[in-house]
Image (cartoon, rainbow, N blue to C red):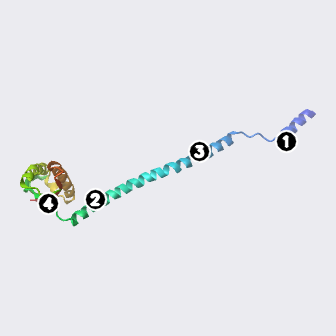
Amino acid sequence: MSEEAKAAEEKKEEAPAKKGKGGVILGVVAVIFVCASSAAGAIVAPIVAAKYQKQQHNAQKKHAEEEDDEEDESHKPAAASCVLDPIVVDLKAADGTSHHLKLGMTLELKSKPHDEEENKAFTPRARAAALEYARVLSYDEATDAKKFDHIRKELSERVLKAAGKKHVKKLLITDFVVQ
């Protein structure tokens, strides 16, 4: 070998092997991705947690208000009321037999006792709304204890809407007899 060839060979041995930049770039990209993910998580997580806590708080508040309303009503003195004449309707059972439902109701009024003339203005509408609702009930629905709360709420909504919420505060079911 010539001296030039030997010198070139020695330089190759002395020169460090070149490394590709691909590994460094990949490492930098991975670090940036991890940092960005952490930052996004740090920003988004509190927002999501706050929203969830707000929903939970609202649900608890609503439940507490419903319980307070029930407790408050039991401790309040009786308000002025208007007793409606009982309603009797026929209910059909699944087997086709006919049964009777007697529904007695009292309207709890928002203000002092009304006179007869004022009661005549809204009691017929209240009775009509109750009658319309009671006639679509089936015997099985009316006798299912689990459905009574739903029946009470639905009946109350319809009667209060018909009677006028400015006059009537609450509907009380005083009789619910199914034969």
Could you tell me which residue is drawn at 56 percent across and 49 percent down? 38
Q: CA distance from mark 1 to mark 3?
A: 38 Å
Where in the figure is residue 141, as x and y percent of width and height?
Answer: 17, 54
- Which one is closest to the eye, mark 4 or mark 3? 4
Instruction: Mark 3: give few (<14), some (14-19) or many (20+) Cα within 10 Å.
Output: few
| Residue 80, numbered circle | 4
Q: Is residue 51 left or right of residue 177?
A: right
Could you tell me which residue is drawn at 6 percent across and 54 percent down? 116
Q: CA distance from mark 1 to mark 2?
A: 86 Å
Q: CA distance from mark 3 to mark 2?
A: 49 Å
- Which one is closest to the eye, mark 3 or mark 2? 2
| Residue picked out by circle 1 | 14
Residue furthest bottom in the image: 75
Instruction: Mark 1: give few (<14), some (14-19) or many (20+) Cα within 10 Å.
Output: few
| Residue 66, numbered circle | 2
Front-lying residue, 129 or 21: 129
- Which one is closest to the eye, mark 4 or mark 2? 4
| Residue picked out by circle 3 | 33
Q: Amino acid at mark 1?
A: Glu
Q: Considering only order in the chain, which callout, 2 or 1, is on the residue closer to the N terminus?
A: 1
- Which one is closest to the eye, mark 1 or mark 2? 2
Instruction: Mark 4: give few (<14), some (14-19) or many (20+) Cα within 10 Å.
Output: some
Front-lying residue, 110 or 6: 110
Where in the figure is residue 174, as x and y percent of width and height?
Answer: 13, 61
Q: Secondary structure at mark 1?
A: helix
- Quarter of the picture containing the C terminus is bottom left
Circle 1/circle 4 CB separation < 8 Å: no
Could you tell me which residue is drawn at 68 percent across and 39 percent down? 22
Q: Secondary structure at mark 2?
A: helix
Instruction: Mark 2: give few (<14), some (14-19) or many (20+) Cα within 10 Å.
Output: few
Circle 3/circle 2 CB separation < 8 Å: no
Q: Is residue 107 left or right of residue 51?
A: left
